[in-house]
Amino acid sequence: MYCIEVIRAEIDLQHHMISAADEAAGSSEVPAMREQWIKTSAELLQGLANLEGVLYRLQSYMLPRIPALDSSALASAIRQGNADFQESQLVANRCAVECDAPQVTNESSQACSASCGNSALLTRVAACQSPTWLPR
């Protein structure tokens, strides 16, 4: 249920990004930029299709098991998935700012790797996109 909630949030984010890319493509007066936004939108649509496939597999796996599971544990997993996704977006944004900025020193590069490269939260949330434990 944790991963179902994470993937639902990812799908919602993907929808917003697709809308923004489509809007940018429609308002761009430069043909090269419009083409780039169209390509970005196509990539986002492919990502959305992948996420929807994962969500379907997760739901198919969980649906017959839900009646036998503790409802408070299910609710807790859903809340934790939502909270972790929200926090992962904050961490990812912070890491993008820290790690994509021009590095002044080797020390700041190492700090970036230490704070963002080994984030257990980002790893846990990202693992939901490709649940290797889930039967095909």
Image: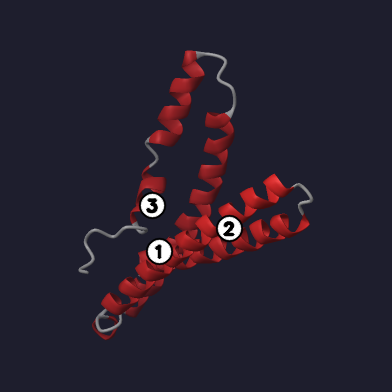
State how far apart marks 3 and 2 are (Cα): 21 Å
Amino acid type indicated by mark 1? Asn
Can residue 126 be seen in this snapshot? yes
The answer to which of marks 1 and 3 sits earlier in the sequence is 1
State how far apart marks 1 and 3 are (Cα): 13 Å
Amino acid type indicated by mark 2? Ser
129 vs 136, left or right, is right
93 vs 115, left or right, is right
The answer to which of marks 3 and 2 sits earlier in the sequence is 2
What is the crowding at mark 3: few (fewer than 14 residues within 10 Å), some, or many (at least 20)? some
Q: Is residue 112 shown above or below 69?
A: above
The answer to which of marks 2 and 1 sits earlier in the sequence is 2
Image coordinates of residue 136 in percent, x first then y, are 22, 69
Image coordinates of residue 48 in percent, x first then y, are 48, 64
Whether the residues at callouts 2 and 1 have beta carbons within 8 Å, the answer is no
The residue shown at (62%, 48%) is: 36
The residue shown at (77%, 56%) is: 27
State how far apart marks 2 and 1 are (Cα): 14 Å
Residue indicated by mark 2: 41
Amino acid type indicated by mark 3? Ala
Residue indicated by mark 3: 126
Residue indicated by mark 1: 50
Can residue 76 be seen in this snapshot? no
Image coordinates of residue 44 in percent, x first then y, are 52, 58
The residue shown at (25%, 84%) is: 64
**Mark in the foreground, 2 or 1:** 2
**Mark in the foreground, 1 or 3:** 1
What is the crowding at mark 1: few (fewer than 14 residues within 10 Å), some, or many (at least 20)? some
The residue shown at (31%, 72%) is: 57
17 vs 99, left or right, is right
